[in-house]
Amino acid sequence: MILTDGLFLDHRRCPRRAHLNFYEPLEREAERGFLTKLRQESAAQVRTVLENFYPHSRELQSSQKDFLTRTNETVHLMQEGVECIANPNLLFEDSTNGVTFLGTPHLLIKVSGESIWGDWSYIPINIQLGRRPKPEYKLIASYYAYLLAKIQQKSPDYAQIILRKNNCYRVNLVEWLPRLERALSDCLAVLSKPQEPEVFISRQHCNLCHWYSHCYAIAQDQQHLSLVPGITPSRYKSLQSLGLSTLDSLVEASPSLLEPIFGRQVVSLLKLQAQSLQEKRAFIKSKHLHPQLPSSLWEFYFDIEAEPELDLEYLLGVLLVNTKTKELKYYSLLAESPQQEHLIWRQFLEIMEQFPTAPIFHYSEYEPETLKKLAYRYSTPTPLLDSLLKRCVDLHQQVMCTVIMPVESYSLKALANWLGFVWRDPGISGDQCVCWYDDWLKTGERSWLDSIVRYNEDDCIATYQLRNWLLDFLTAPNAN
Ligand code: SF4
């Protein structure tokens, strides 16, 4: 078996993904645009760091695909005592369990200390896009240190990570090598069995995965409990131990069986959520948990599109609604270049001032947090910001406090789809818009912006429809 650093990382994110990549690599879907963008940004960052800080590092000469020759070349350069080796290939064959370990850190740096080569050895450096040293970064850096220790017969004193803004972090190998060994053994145990690990759909891990359609179809077919909001992997394990693994079984389970494990409140919510999905209808959780939804002649529905890499809020989408006439007017405040963010912020403030008592509905914490960020960035007076924040109404919070809906996730898209709202361009996400905005900046092709604006306008209209539904549902005389 050949275990690469990529496969090992896949296993950390989802054992099933590593297994599918290992056994059925040709079956997977194409990489999502947003992941391609991240990969390109990461490669650009590696190039920048190498050019700026390690201009004299030695590159391997052989083709990227010829890993055996690259491995030999790497060994050769280490034997020679080259100060700094860029994109080396590390290979270690463990004959005891028949596994070949492969890894390509971004750099090897020569340091003093006896090794198989003489009175020098190497430490690995990895360049990462993130701002903070995530556990995943530390684990993969430890993996390279582990391979180096086998190859040069000297354990590196530390492994280094270069983060965004060139912040350096040293991984404590005393702490991380034992964790690595446990993780490697788990990974090899999964990959050595032909049986694929069970599906578990989690928004965090699955959304961008190239096996999503495949896994989602299986989960639906099995009525898998991971499709029930609130079922975490650890709750799922506990339910399995009670012999419950489908939606129907959860609906029918006696609360007295579940309450000793999960507590009364959680059981009542999980069962109601399962019932809602089974019967395809919404339930009221509480009419009183949250202040009433404000109503006003004029209302705003607000949604933002951002480019995190540029730290840019490039589209402030505002839908103005006259609740009496039901007239809708959409404003797309669009920064066609990063320099125009200031301009669209001013336009936004002007529109808000024209209707100073209109509530501002939105569907996440992101909008008020962004208002604070932009106000700070452009020195907006604090009283003005405070008055905007007081008008903000987070519909997501309102929904979560008051109702249970027959959806697999409480995203705006899932809720609005259940209400019958359809986005004009199906299958688009905020991540996709980030890629489109980058395409616009690179090519000047206007159709990218048009697609983003259409998507944002639909988000605002969906928020408006959700608010109408919620108000009607909560105030209906026969509401359950
Ligand atoms: S879709 Fe989810 S469960 Fe399936 S392989 Fe990907 S991360 Fe794992």
Image: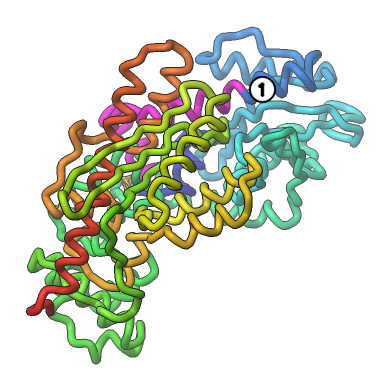
From the viewer's perspective, tell me whether residue 314 is left or right of residue 26. Answer: right
Q: Residue at x 55, y 53 (%)?
A: 385
Report the residue marked by disc 1: 88
Q: Quadrant of the N terminus?
A: top left
* Position above or below: 9 against 442: below
Is residue 237 magenta-colored? no
Specify the segment rendered in magenta. Answer: 17-44
Give x and y (percent) for residue 389.
Answer: 49, 58
Name the foreground residue: 140 vs 261.
261
How many tags in the picture?
1
Relative vertical location of residue 242 with respect to residue 282 in this rendering, above or below: below
Residue 282: image location, x then y, percent = 15, 68
Dividing the picture into quadrants, the one containing residue 146 is: top right
Relative to 427, 136 lies left or right = right
Mark 1 residue's CB less than 8 Å from ligand 1: no
Compared with 224, 370 (above or below) is above
The residue at 76%/33% (across/down) is 152
Is 27 inside the magenta-drawn segment?
Answer: yes
Q: Position of residue 96 (x, y in %)?
A: 56, 44
Decide which of 326, 135 is in the foreground and name it.
326
Q: Quadrant of residue 293?
A: bottom left
Q: Secondary structure at mark 1?
A: loop
Residue 15 visible: no
Who's the residue at 51% across and 37% down the image? 345
Q: Is residue 88 above or below residue 8?
A: above
Dominant SS type (magenta): helix
Amino acid under disc 1: Pro
Q: In this orientation, which residue lies closer to the viewer: 268 or 343?
A: 343
Disc 1 crowd, CA 10 A, few/some/many (<14, 14-19, 20+)? many
